[in-house]
Amino acid sequence: GAVVSQHPSWVICKSGTSVKIECRSLDFQATTMFWYRQFPKQSLMLMATSNEGSKATYEQGVEKDKFLINHASLTLSTLTVTSAHPEDSSFYICSARTGGMETQYFGPGTRLLVL
Amino acid sequence: GQNIDQPTEMTATEGAIVQINCTYQTSGFNGLFWYQQHAGEAPTFLSYNVLDGLEEKGRFSSFLSRSKGYSYLLLKELQMKDSASYLCAAMDSNYQLIWGAGTKLIIKP
């Protein structure tokens, strides 16, 4: 149980394009989903927290107009990196938890490379 | 402020035992998590402690002392596949995880 999937696992795109990453909870309803970013050899950095049906809460320094988060259902959240630039290249990881469950379960991550 | 401290790197020998320590300071406390992260992969859940004491799960055990703001992850009978980063995270009063920077564990034959 508690399986989280992400799609795609790898994205290579040109600078200026937008990229959408999907995060799905496969066997539970995720009332809360989290989006993290991790640069090589660095720790996880929380970007935003999203609760189903409401606007995401962004961490300080994360541009909400650049990283659009939608959590429209209890099993799906999307992160759209708008007008991606090379400095956005990173490992993006989502996690999910359901009400009454403290543990966050992580998706496998999405590697984004912006050329 | 909120803070998690854990060693940056540790080295141990295959077959041995290693203890990875973590100290935390958070606004409120709703539990302590340990995750394992292999290079290039996402973290996977190892353990959750909210009460004082030792929780054993196979070769891995996790200990918590709430009064000391201290936890450790104990790995026994180390295998080469245990080479990974181990992340300590404390949950604050808002149920948000405060992450440590991770401890890179290197296993030598």
Image (tube, rainbow, N blue to C red):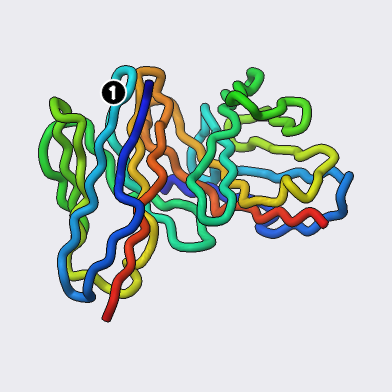
Residue at the image point whose x is 55% and y is 54% from the top = A108
- Residue B52 located left or right of residue B35: left
Q: Residues within 10 Å of mark 1 (few under 14, many from 20)?
A: some
Is B5 drawn above or below residue B3 in the view shown?
A: below
- Residue B20 located left or right of residue A108: left
Q: How many marks?
A: 1
Farthest residue in the left direction? B53
Q: Chain of mark 1?
A: B
Residue A90, horizontal then vertical, whole percent = 65, 51
Residue A46, horizontal then vertical, whole percent = 54, 35
Where, quadrant-wise, is the N terminus of chain B in this rendering?
top left
Please state which of residues B83 and A95 is positioned toward the viewer in this rendering: B83
Local secondary structure at mark 1:
loop
The residue indicated by pointer 1 is B29
Please state which of residues A21 and B9 is positioned toward the viewer in this rendering: B9
- Residue B64 located left or right of residue A76: left
Please tell me in which quadrant of the rendered image residue A101 appears.
Answer: top left
Where, quadrant-wise, is the C terminus of chain B in this rendering?
bottom left
Is B16 drawn above or below residue A87 in the view shown?
A: below
Residue at the image point whose x is 20% and y is 40% from the top = B71
